[in-house]
Amino acid sequence: MISNVACAAILVFLSFYAGVQNGKQISKNESRIEIENDRVVVCRNFHLPHAFTPMHSHREGVVIYLSDVHERSTSPDGTSKEVSHKAGEVVWAPAREHALENLENTKIEVIEVELKEP
């Protein structure tokens, strides 16, 4: 199943990557649902420089980094860790709950492909 999800994530990445620089100015942190059906939710997320995203949850799935990322992820118990990724990385992410802080002077953009329960 992971190989099917990975293939789907790569296809989503390739289809959206060409549209990443669409000229739209992002004025705040933003999350847009790009695709939703009975099996997945695909979200495009933007985080402005040094912006804080409050506590939220994710289903398990694939994260596709469209920009370099350096952020602080804080769990509900208060523990935090710094996380870094390079543009183009694709990773499997378990279900999780966290708050995020963009630690850089640049905007973060990611695509998240979250699996729904069968």
Image (tube, helix red, strand yellow):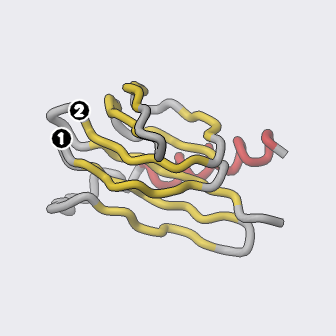
Give the answer, above or below, for where 88 lies relative to 101. above
Q: Secondary structure at mark 1?
A: loop
The disc at residue 50 is 1
Between 23 and 28, which is closer to the camera in this rendering? 28
Between 96 and 10, which is closer to the camera in this rendering? 96
Q: What residue appears at the point 41 percent right and 39 percent down from the top-left corner? A: 78
Q: Secondary structure at mark 2?
A: loop
Q: Give yes or no for contact between labels 1 and 2 (Cβ–Cβ under 8 Å).
A: yes
Callout 2: few (<14), some (14-19), or many (20+) C-alpha neighbours within 10 Å? many
**Label 1 vs label 2: CA separation?**
5 Å
Residue 29, horizontal then vertical, whole percent: 26, 58
Q: Mark 2 belongs to which amino acid?
A: Leu
Residue 9, horizontal then vertical, whole percent: 63, 47
Is 54 on the left or on the right of 3, as rendered? left
Q: Earlier in the sequence, mark 1 or mark 2?
A: 1
Q: What residue appears at the point 59 percent right and 34 percent down from the top-left corner? A: 91
